[in-house]
Image: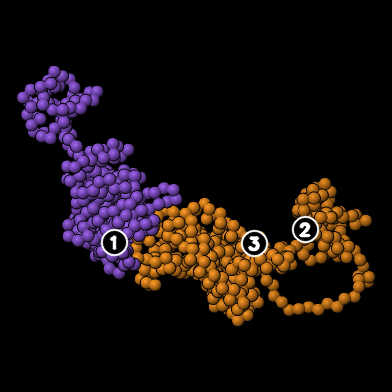
Amino acid sequence: MNLKRLWAIFKARNHEFFRDRAAFGWNFIFPFLIVGGFVLMFGGDSRNEYKVGVFPAGTGTFSVDAADIPARFRETRYLQFIGFADEADGLDRLKHHKIDFLVKAGSRTNEYWVSDTSPRGYIVEQLFNHSLVPDASQPLAERRKIRGFEIRYVDWLFPGILAMNMMFSALYGVGYTVVRYRKNGVLKRLKATPLSAFEYLSAQMLSRIFLLMFTTVIVWVGCDLVFSFRTVGSYGAILVIFFLGSLSLTSLGLILAARGTSEEFTSGILNFISWPMMFLSEVWFSLEGAPDWIRSAAKIFPLTHMLTATRRVMNDGATLADVSSELTALLIMTAVCLVIGASLFSWNR
Amino acid sequence: MSHLLEVIDLVKRYKAMEAVKNVSFAVTEGSCFGLLGPNGAGKTTTLEVIENVIPPTSGTILYRGAPRTASFSEEVGIQFQETTLLAYMTVRETLQTFQSLYEESSDLEKLIDLCYLGDFQHQYNDRISGGQKQRFLLALALVNQPALLFLDEPSTGLDPQARQNLWQIVQRIKEEGKTIILTTHYMEEAEFLCDEVAIMDDGRIIAQGTPGELIRKYGGEKSVSLPRSVLTGVLDRLPFSFRETRERIALLTEDVNACLQALIHERIDLSDLTVNVQNLETVFLNLTGRQLRE
């Protein structure tokens, strides 16, 4: 290992990243836009609300307080009421699951409509029927409260967005780029020098990890200043997790970079890996309640371990020791990918 | 003079296609050796096997009398036929990067002067002209002060002026005592730069020697050509064999002076006369029956 050669390639790759203004800017803007968009969409309490249609309603702004529907149903939390001019209008939305439940205001028989294929409709139906039962008839139950703090959807989502950005940057920044270099002859030119494959791949990896950490820290600080995320655990621990995560994702990129001269084929393979990883690693939604085999399958992805560990530190205040199993998984994946990538690597093919 | 490089029975096969067929030659230290031939003759494949960029199917390559070792790449400079360079890097930065890849490196300022890179050294690699790029690639091949320099069709695609400039630089590199192996399909380039040439066709070397030797051996006869109309009626009196085309007649001769004197004696109009001399182009034509750039 010659450090002078490694440093030269490391610097050259960094120059390429920092001087390609469009790609450089996009690395920062993309996660910021996604987080901003989700804050706008789900910033309030609207994410888990059930939508209840009420008709007939006037043409102006609909106010549920003025609607003649059972008072206890009207006062139930987490329901969003939407007014419709007539029954046909409401039924049309209900058929297409745009609302979960439709109730007729002023009906003496408390007429309602619900789709028998809608799980959400079933829940609202239970709430509606429950609201019609007088208090005295309610079965006794003991209520115990816990102290907790709210984790907004964006607080939960934010590490996912950052990790997703890291995943695409690692896979495309190493896998796709090296294949492009092989195709256009850059690798052939480098092969003619004393630079070894190990030095070249190490430089590529280190450069990408440096750039990933750099962009992630900038994006985190920027988003935190604007959107004020709540981080219970230590930032240092999160940094360590992100470092190991970028190490394992970049190593995965090396496997993709090992062979091939077709950018189109590589792009297809990258999509084949990155899309399932994005959905199964809980970037966008939790797999809580999903079948066991799906939860097990998700564990083959480094992103899953990285996100699990990050969220535990960020939301629950876990320490590095608490997430040691995830960190170990990331290290093992890194080692496996490095061995496979390095042994398959070819300058020409 | 000793041989810096020896290639013995080199074969390179790609599945069913044999690109290089038992090629053997030796390159004397300090000389410029040319591999000539049309496109697809196997020149580049031969060169890339010697450069250690692709492995041979069989054969032996000796550098300084021994098989090439890991240090071979430290001692050679390579200019590929087509090269894409690292993006978003200036010419100067690229040279510095490549310098860092070698144990020993040339003086950067001298290299920039030698290859006339000064005017565009701070421009990005992809913002320079074809002639500038070829000079830059030549400089890149020289960053490690190589003992052996490989130039694969260095002037292809250049205009005559840029080509002449490149030849002058290669000539200066030769004068520094470096050994050069050059591939080209420009015969005039080989005649100008090479001390020895090997003519390749269909993966084989079909002739080898100094340009002068090859021309003497395979160049055929010189000829003096005139329009058919001016030779009508006098052809029987001229002591030359001839070759006819539809519009012209070529008088075949070993002695152009004697031929011209005979024509003047016959008071023939020489205003449309051409003298066809032997060169490597005619050597190739005579050896293969084909034009070099077919």
Please give the name of the residue rendered at 73% of the width and 63% of the height, measured from the top-left corner. Answer: A48
Find the residue positioned furthest to the top: B233
Q: Amino acid at mark 3?
A: Phe
Can see residue B127? no
Which badge, 2 or 3, is on the more N-terminal residue? 2
Chain ID of residue with mark 3: A
Please give the name of the residue rendered at 69% of the width and 75% of the height, measured from the top-left corner. Answer: A149
| The N terminus of chain A, quarter of image | bottom left
| Circle 1: element type | strand
Q: Amino acid at mark 2?
A: Lys
User: Is residue B222 found left or right of B204 in the rendered image?
Assistant: left
| Circle 2: element type | strand
Chain coloured orange in the rendered structure:
A
Chain coloured purple in the rendered structure:
B
Q: Quadrant of residue A137?
A: bottom right
Label 1 Cα neighbours within 10 Å, binned few <14 / some 14-19 / many ≥20: some
Label number found at residue B62: 1
* Residue highlighted by disc 3: A279
User: Is residue B148 found left or right of A63 in the rendered image?
Assistant: left
| Alpha carbons under labels 1 and 2: distance apart | 81 Å
Q: Does residue B272 sit above or below B95 in this rendering?
A: above
Q: Does residue B226 sit above or below A7 in this rendering?
A: above
Label number found at residue B147: none
| Circle 3: element type | helix
| The C terminus of chain A, quarter of image | bottom left
Q: Report x, y in % for residue B262.
A: 7, 27
1 and 3 marks in contact (CB < 8 Å): no
Chain ID of residue with mark 2: A
